[in-house]
């Protein structure tokens, strides 16, 4: 084999190896990009799962009102979870942006209810202007608005007036039939 042929053959194989290295680098980049997207999706799913676990107990605590004539028409907080809730209180909207002083209901044990002292003319009035606040067994403070939304309270003792005022204003315009009892 001549020296020129050997040099040309080496150059061809070097070029093939260079193209192979470029193709490998492109494929590795695409795989890394796809893996990064999958990791991002897993992180989002993990955040959703964590949020759901945080809300698991709180989602089972709600306000209700009896619909039969045998009971006085009052709102009551019900704990449908398997753990107690603490520092439970109810506040009522006096205007679309103003809440009453909290009515302290205390600790509510699993499966039990705590009645509010305030009586109402109808179920809609009892529920559409009431805000429930409580602390779950994990020590997280929650606010349940009249429309059923559940919010983690980052500053216990300070109600989110902006959030609640728009919710309460909307609820004041809604029909009493729109609120479950």
Image: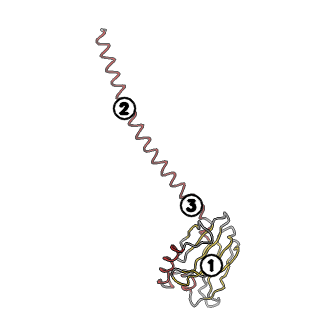
Q: Is residue 42 left or right of residue 63?
A: left
Count the marks: 3
Residue 51 spot, x, y in % from top left: 56, 60
Residue 134 spot, x, y in % from top left: 64, 72
- Which element carries disc 3, helix, strand or loop? helix
The residue depicted at 51 percent of the width and 51 percent of the height is 42
Image-quadrant location for residue 110:
bottom right
Residue 71 spot, x, y in % from top left: 65, 88
Which residue is the site of mark 3?
51
Front position in the image: 40 or 83: 40
Image-quadrant location for residue 16:
top left
Residue 93 spot, x, y in % from top left: 56, 82
Mark 1 vs 3, N-terminal side: 3
The residue depicted at 46 percent of the width and 45 percent of the height is 36
Residue 139 numbered mark, or none: none
Q: Is residue 106 above or below residue 67?
A: above
- Between circles 1 and 3, the one closer to the viewer is 1
Asked if the residues shown at circle 3 and circle 2 are in contact, with their CB atoms under 8 angstroms apart, the answer is no
Separation of residues labelled 1 and 3 (CA atoms) = 24 Å
Separation of residues labelled 3 and 2 (CA atoms) = 43 Å
Mark 3 vs 2, N-terminal side: 2
Which residue is the site of mark 1?
90
Which residue is the site of mark 2?
22
- Which element carries disc 1, helix, strand or loop? strand
Asked if the residues shown at circle 1 and circle 3 are in contact, with their CB atoms under 8 angstroms apart, the answer is no
The residue depicted at 31 percent of the width and 14 percent of the height is 7
Image-quadrant location for residue 1:
top left
Front position in the image: 133 or 23: 133
Front position in the image: 166 or 115: 166
Q: Residues within 10 Å of mark 1 (few under 14, many from 20)?
A: many
Q: Is residue 79 left or right of residue 37?
A: right
């Amino acid at each position: 084999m001549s020296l020129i042929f050997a040099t040309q053959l080496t150059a061809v194989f070097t070029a093939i190896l260079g193209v192979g290295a470029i193709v490998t680098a492109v494929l590795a980049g695409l795989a890394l990009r796809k893996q990064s997207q999958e990791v991002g999706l897993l992180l989002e799913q993990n955040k959703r799962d964590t949020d759901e676990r945080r809300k698991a107990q709180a989602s089972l605590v709600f306000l209700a009102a009896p619909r039969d004539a045998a009971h006085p028409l009052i709102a009551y907080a019900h704990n449908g979870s398997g753990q107690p809730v603490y520092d439970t209180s109810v506040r009522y909207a006096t205007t679309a942006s103003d809440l009453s002083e909290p009515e302290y209901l205390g600790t509510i044990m699993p499966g039990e209810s705590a009645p509010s002292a305030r009586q109402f003319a109808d179920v809609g009035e009892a529920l559409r202007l009431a805000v429930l606040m409580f602390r779950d067994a994990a020590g997280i403070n929650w606010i349940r608005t009249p429309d059923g939304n559940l919010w983690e309270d980052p500053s216990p003792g300070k109600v989110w007036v902006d959030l609640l005022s728009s919710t309460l204003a909307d609820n004041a315009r809604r029909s009493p039939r729109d609120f479950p009892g």
